[in-house]
Image (cartoon, grey):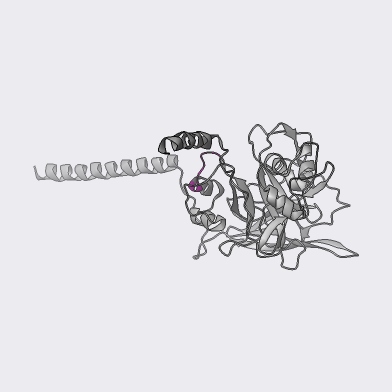
Amino acid sequence: MTSSLHPLLLQLLLLLPLSPPPSASAARFACGGGTCQSLLGYAPPNATTLAEVKSLFQLRSLRGSLLAPNSLPLSTPSSLPLPLPAASLLRLRLPCSCSRGVGASFRRPLYMVKAGDTLDAIARGTFAGFVTSGEIAAANNLSDPNRVAVGQQLYVPLPCSCDAVGGEEVVHYAHAVAAGSSVARIAAEFGTTEETLMRLNGIKDPNGLQAGQILDVPLRACSSSISSTSIDRNLRVPNGSYILTANNCVLCSCSSSSWQLDCHPTQGISSSTCPAAMCGNMYLGNTSSSSPCERATCAYTGYTNKTSSFAILTNLTIQSLCNTSGAPPLSQPTSGAALRLGLQGVKLTELLIFFHIALLCLAFLSRC
């Protein structure tokens, strides 16, 4: 009996390595409610173009959904070949809607089934594992997920969220883990903490990440002066990107140097299409200094689009550049200037020592 079991066990052990390893499942991002704009980091598996990516993900705007989140010039043609020489990842801006505690891309992308397609191939191959075949089947009420018809249109629910994190408004970024990456490395790359990433994604072991695993990464957004009554009151822009708002008449960018939204009229749009955006005689985005301690900026505060009128709202904001004593901040000397000051101090000390020696010598000679 014992001898007959050994060959069977050996065969089973030999077969185990041939079984495919379990793939990292796509994440369902927690989302309490509401709608927003979220980001997804897509790495095209094959050579493609911006236009083809726009078509695949059913993006409404090339400029707003592709050029802006990747800080590409507005003049970039849709025929631009991908992947880009400087980066393999392309950030896509997607509309997000929350329902029953989970966020998903709002009503798109819509994918048309081709000959030879399966739900698993669509999920893993076409949409890079950001969704599972089961999630596609559930979103489209498919009774048999193994049977899809050529020409059938499927809604692909991509993960997203609109929730604040730690009391701060953020932009949620769906990130696919690269091979060899870690929680610490991802946190450092995107300016968040390991604790935040682990809590958001339910990670128990920070060393247990799998290549291809989808993580919810919160990106800090720039603060702004946008009014709570403005149509774009929920505008959130992360560092290193820009966004078009107010019917594309205003371009707002975010920089980590100030973490304050910087908005200007969009270049290249006809003045007849966009109303004037001014604070008195100062144009939107311009600054002026009435004194060394104050700087005035014509800041963007939103827009209204009523039946009879479309208006861009602005407000003159005053920034204090001085300390509490009323004196402007002192400029710090450069290393060269500090070195020169140090040398001057040394020369002055030497001169004082020489002067004292000379006085002692004169006193000594007068006694002789």
Q: In the image shown, does 43 or 208 lie closer to the viewer?
A: 208
- Note whether residue 157 is visible: no
Q: Farthest front residue? A: 1
- Quarter of the figure that contains the N terminus: top left
Q: Position of residue 222 (x, y in %)?
A: 63, 56
Q: Residue at x 77, y 36 (%)?
A: 116
- Residue at the left extreme, as displayed: 368
Q: Nearer the viewer, residue 46 or 79?
A: 46
The picture places residue 36, in percent across and down from the top left corner, at 71, 58
Nearest to the observer: residue 335 or residue 11: 11
Q: Quadrant of the C terminus?
A: top left
Instruction: Residue at 84%, 54% (x, y): give it.
Output: 274
Residue 336 location (% of width, % of height): 44, 39
Span colored in magenta: 179-184
**Furthest residue toward right:** 308
109 horizontally vs 334: left or right: right
Q: Position of residue 256 (x, y in %)?
A: 58, 50
Left or right: residue 355 compared with residue 51? left
Quadrant of residue 95 within the rendered picture:
bottom right
- Quarter holding residue 295: bottom right
Residue 236: in magenta span: no
Residue 200, visible in the rendered structure: yes
Please state the total of marks drawn on the protein image.
0
Q: Is residue 44 above or below residue 276?
A: above
Between 191 and 269, the residue placed more toward the observer is 191
Magenta stretch secondary structure, dominant? loop
